[in-house]
């Protein structure tokens, strides 16, 4: 008779079990302590670790009335097809608030029965969305990247999401194997001329649904923080009116793409205004308000997932 070998549980195993008992089993911390044979204090720490390590994802199934009112106001103001406003979390990172709502929207699309091509940008908000997505089978869909996957040092872009989400939902994926921003426009054009890159770009342009982050062009611009532009390049584009970027493409306060700066060297596919299919922006935070408003005005995005505080600021006169 064969013998089953059991390895000792890791601290994360213990946290996962405690989190499961608390959030799914409905046990109190005293009951968890008794079940696992540990102290109440250790049970409390394990439950907290389960949440902090992302082992447990909590979603609010009740739509708060204030958020519903804000969604309605945003739809009316900007003609949005899809809109979700999450309750804000005070001073916490707003990505924590909007990631579950964004994940629910992506899961809704992935569960549609007809095959779709889903285009994805990159960034912190999309990374949060993908981390919050529940594993599911969606092999009938295709996932394609809108933006280059290569960072300035040649490494894979840290906030790229295409392979991460593909692994979770078992869907074929098509990365954009070019630099996010090339050193020169000639190099960018050389990459674009490659057959495999052209095919991925064509696939991205014809996507049925688009999910993108919206980046600000203030001093905390993601393009600057992640090393894709220099301070001088950022200042040059701001002097030309830059207010935000989507998939690396920079636009002004009215959502009009600029013909200066890194836009002459950006390697991915630009999300065109007035698409006849969903183009959903996922973004929140005070510094992003001008960028989100510009993308909404020109309809680079025709759907929005944000938080309560950001929604109020967007709607302010």
Image (cartoon, rainbow, N blue to C red):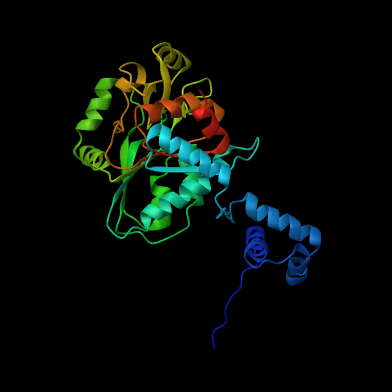
Q: Nearer the viewer, residue 273 or 268?
A: 273
x, y percentage for residue 4? 57, 79
Q: Residue at x 73, y 69 (%)?
A: 36
x, y percentage for residue 55? 59, 56
Q: Residue at x 63, y 64 (%)?
A: 20
Work out whether 202 lies above or below 56: above
Q: Is residue 213 visible in this depiction of the protein?
A: no
Q: Is residue 105 visible in this depiction of the protein?
A: yes
Q: Nearer the viewer, residue 41 or 188?
A: 41
Q: Residue at x 54, y 38 (%)?
A: 307
Q: Quadrant of residue 121?
A: top left
Work out whether 17 lies above or below 242: below
Q: Residue at x 34, y 55 (%)?
A: 171
Work out whether 95 lies above or below 107: above
Q: Quadrant of residue 183?
A: top left
- Judge from the rendering whether residue 210 lies leftward or rightward of residue 135; answer left or right: left
Q: Nearer the viewer, residue 284 or 30?
A: 284
Q: Quadrant of residue 261?
A: top left
x, y percentage for residue 164? 43, 49
Work out whether 207 lies above or below 310: below
């Amino acid at each position: 008779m064969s013998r089953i070998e059991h390895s000792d549980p890791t601290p994360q195993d213990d946290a996962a079990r405690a989190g499961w008992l608390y959030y799914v089993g409905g046990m109190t911390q005293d009951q968890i302590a008794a079940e696992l044979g540990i102290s109440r204090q250790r049970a409390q720490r394990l439950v907290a670790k389960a949440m902090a390590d992302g082992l447990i994802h909590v979603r609010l199934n009740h739509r708060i009335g204030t958020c519903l009112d804000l969604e309605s106001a945003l739809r009316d103001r900007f003609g949005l097809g899809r809109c979700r406003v999450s309750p804000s979390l005070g001073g916490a990172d707003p990505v924590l608030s909007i990631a579950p709502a964004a994940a629910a929207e992506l899961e809704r699309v992935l569960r549609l029965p007809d095959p779709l091509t889903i285009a994805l940008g990159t960034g912190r908000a999309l990374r949060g969305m993908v981390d919050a997505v529940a594993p599911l089978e969606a092999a009938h869909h295709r996932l394609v990247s809108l933006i280059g996957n290569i960072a300035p040092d040649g490494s894979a872009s840290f906030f790229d999401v295409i392979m991460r989400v593909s692994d979770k939902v078992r869907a074929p994926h098509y990365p954009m194997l070019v630099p996010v921003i090339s050193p020169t426009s000639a190099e960018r054009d050389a990459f674009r001329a490659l057959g495999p890159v052209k095919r991925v770009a064509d696939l991205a342009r014809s996507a049925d649904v688009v999910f993108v982050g919206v980046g600000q062009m203030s001093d905390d611009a993601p393009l600057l923080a992640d090393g894709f532009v220099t301070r001088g390049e950022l200042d040059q584009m701001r002097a030309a009116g830059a207010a935000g970027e989507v998939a690396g493409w920079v636009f002004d306060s009215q959502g009009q793409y600029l013909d200066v700066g890194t836009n002459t060297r950006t390697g991915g596919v630009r999300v065109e205004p007035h698409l006849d299919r969903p183009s959903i922006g996922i973004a929140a935070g005070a510094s992003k308000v001008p960028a989100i408003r510009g993308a909404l005005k020109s309809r680079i995005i025709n759907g929005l997932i944000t938080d309560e505080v950001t929604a109020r600021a967007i709607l302010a006169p």
